[in-house]
Image (cartoon, rainbow, N blue to C red):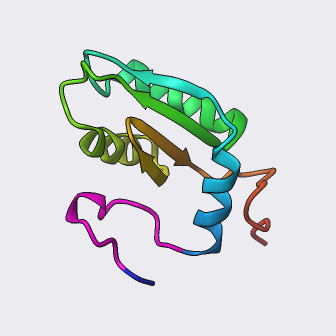
Amino acid sequence: MPAARSPRKRFLMPSGALRRALRAAGHRLRPAVQVGKDGVTDAVVRQLDEALRAHELVKVKVGSEAPEDRFESAERLGQRAGAGIAQVLGRTVLVYRRHPERPRFEPPSR
């Protein structure tokens, strides 16, 4: 798998068919979680965890007043939620975590 060209994007999911499918599906989504002036807090992570449990693929909007930049916020969101980052586009982050019972984007594990 090719590595990310920018060292700031080293935390992104590896390129491949799954990531392309996630980016295509995420195009039509609206942001469900927002990172505000306090940054990535426990409340934001809880909200993201609930959204991922319900939807598997979630858009997160990083506000311009957030204390860290969009790449740092995306990396922290992915680590703390145990999820993969499919895309960082502008101030929008596309977060994915496979649903344990009903995965939509990957075949069920046996």
Count all numbered tags in the image, as a single digit. 0
Query: Residue 66, image x and y in percent?
Result: 25, 23
- Residue bounds of the magenta highlight: 3-15
Residue 4 on the magenta span: yes
Question: Where, by quadrant of the figure, is residue 98 drawn?
Answer: bottom right
Q: Is the magenta stretch mostly helix, strand or loop?
A: loop
Quadrant of the snapshot with the N terminus: bottom left
- In the foreground, 46 or 55: 55
Question: Residue at left 54%, top 33%?
Answer: 49
Quadrant of the snapshot with the C terminus: bottom right
- In the foreground, 16 or 47: 16
Question: Residue at left 28%, top 46%?
Answer: 71
Is residue 99 toward the left or the right of residue 96 in the image? right
Query: Residue 108, image x and y in percent?
Result: 79, 65
Question: Residue at left 26%, top 15%?
Answer: 37
Residue 53 on the magenta span: no
Question: Residue at left 78%, top 54%?
Answer: 104
